[in-house]
Amino acid sequence: MTNLTSLLVANRGEIAVRIFRTARALGLATVAVHSDPDADALHVRDADAAVRLPGAAPADTYLRGDLIIKAALAAGADAVHPGYGFLSENADFAREVLAAGLTWIGPPPEAIEAMASKTRAKELMRTAGVPLLDPVDPATATPADLPLLLKAAAGGGGRGMRVVRDLDQLKEALDAASAEARSAFGDGEVFAEPYVERGRHVEVQILADTHGTVWALGTRDCSLQRRHQKVIEEAPAPGLPESLRETLHTAAVAAARAVSYEGAGTVEFLVTADGRPYFLEMNTRLQVEHPVTEAVFDLDLVALQLRLAEGAALPPAPPQPTGHAVEARLYAEDPAQDWRPQTGALHTLAIPGTVRVDTGFTAGDTVGIHYDPMLAKVVAHAPTRAEAVRALATALAGARIHGLTTNRELLVRSLRHPEFATGQLDTGFYDRHLDTLTGDTPDPTPAALAAALAEASPGPDAPLATRLGGWRNVRSQPQTRRYTTADTEVEVQYHPVNHPGVRVLSVERHLVTLELDGIRRMFHVKQNSNEIYVDSALGAHTFTRVPRFPDPQDRTEPGSLLAPMPGTVVRVAEGLTPGTPVTAGQPLLWLEAMKMEHRILAPASGTLTALHVATGQQVEFGALLAVVQEEPQS
């Protein structure tokens, strides 16, 4: 048995904070590593010690295994936990950790290596009798093979994946998937397999010790995805016949035994609409969605990882599961704008209820451009699925999140969608419902009125005569306030005491109570610089004060393509130079930010008259990338 005393987490954000929580409970000292942008991040503040990794980009910091091992030795750590992402599935890094005399909190390097390439892993699984989809050779693909799914052989997280429905688009999609995979994982290998329409993404959590015991810890459904990345996960996967659950458990254990697995891992399957399972991949690490399994089995998977690394043995069988758990990933992104990631200051992050919140942020932190835009994972556990879903939706609806656009409203609407309630989920959910889930925003007028009243309130520190006199002096003309919210301008007019159709019950700087159509409503108001945040049961709104005299310099030349976010230009369309004719919707540039790739499209057919960026160039939000002069209408 090994006796661990100090743990370095080779990661950042919420997973580092979550691992530190368990390490402290087990009496271990904790060591963080951080890039320069993360110097004051929560995971750094949360650790007993922290070591700087000079630089900002992941390639210079969290992907530098040599610097991380050096940091562990310098800080006196005797074990390294990789979390997920970054170096968590890098067999060479695991070997280097062990060679340095440190304990690796993960599976043997040989098991990582065996599953690192999806193509080689599938060959191994075929030998082990695990069901597989037959691969398709892109060079000989026919219309009968469509649709195809292109996947990067290395890595995960949806990077290097494309769905192809037209053979004419196959070569372009292969090139794009290969380029993205090479950029993300240093390996441009891409393979093709049939794309299963309306398939379910179901996975099995496994746990194995060094004594030959392998647990299959139930199933998880991770079908609700955007850009092949999971958004909502739950355990157990709803609506599966018991025979199918047994098949998945047996296949997962066979996959683990085939590579002599040790520690925590996940075997992922695609389940067709008629209930046939096919192996997708094995993640040789802890998964983002592991909390739902922890909730259902009442286990701490990180604690078990640490004990297994010390040499402990598992009991012959896992505990019995109870209830249902659902997790939602709260992202700083705008689902209505092609899932565009958001950056900036997070002024407020408060989620009510008895839910579990795993986060790497607190109020006042900044969400930067270098890393994944996930703010938090919110998890609800209850005796039944319906109760867990309701608790999670209620907690998210009541959350106060200020400073950044998030997918919070999408999550709430998804959890309350009639199709989600049935439990018959598939990976095409957002393809079918995204427009509905992101449309029909609530009327901002009552919230704007509350914002205006709160602004007009002199506050509790003002003299009593001022506070009372302001409400008794009825002006002959109404007061007017103008705001913008979600690209819409809202104007509200009000008298200090008279509001048509509205009774003002109380007004404070941070809380306005109104009676609307006979119903009492409370509006929580927070003002920050030029923005006002209003939260109520009717929804959350962010208002920006409209200046009396707009700045004429805000206008840009027609056809200007501006950077929708800060990021790096990773590709420029082949042959694109000033004078090149372009067509509306044609991809001109590819911008990478926060681990996601975004296409910059020609806004109209015409001529590219200016190109201001090149591959590899860093750009700021709003930077002028290019200009397209629209061709005149005939």
Image: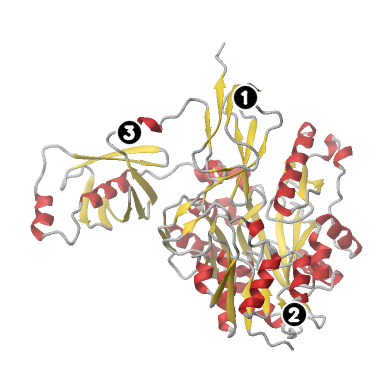
Q: How busy is the neighbourhood of tag 2: few (under 14 within 10 Å), some, or many (20 plus)?
A: few
| First of labels 2, 1 by sequence position | 2
Mark 2: which amino acid? Gly
Residue 271 lies, in percent from the top left, at: 75, 56
Q: Which label sits in the foreground, 3 or 1?
A: 1
Task: Kindly indicate the quadrant of the structure image that contains residue 377.
Answer: bottom right
Q: What residue is drawn where x is 82% and y is 66%?
A: 251
Counting from the top left corner in percent of width and height, residue 62 is at 64, 62
Q: Nearer the viewer, residue 62 or 327?
A: 62
Residue 101's label in the rendered image is: 2
Point out the tag, 3 or 2, that comes first from the N-terminus.
Answer: 2
User: Residue under circle 1?
Assistant: 578
Badge 1 element? loop
From the image, which quarter does the C terminus lie in? top right
Q: Which one is earlier in the sequence, the residue at label 3 or at label 1?
A: 3
| Left or right placement of residue 263 versus residue 568 in this view | right
Above or below for 324 versus 534: below
Mark whose residue sits in front, 3 or 2: 2
Q: CA distance from mark 3 to mark 1?
A: 32 Å
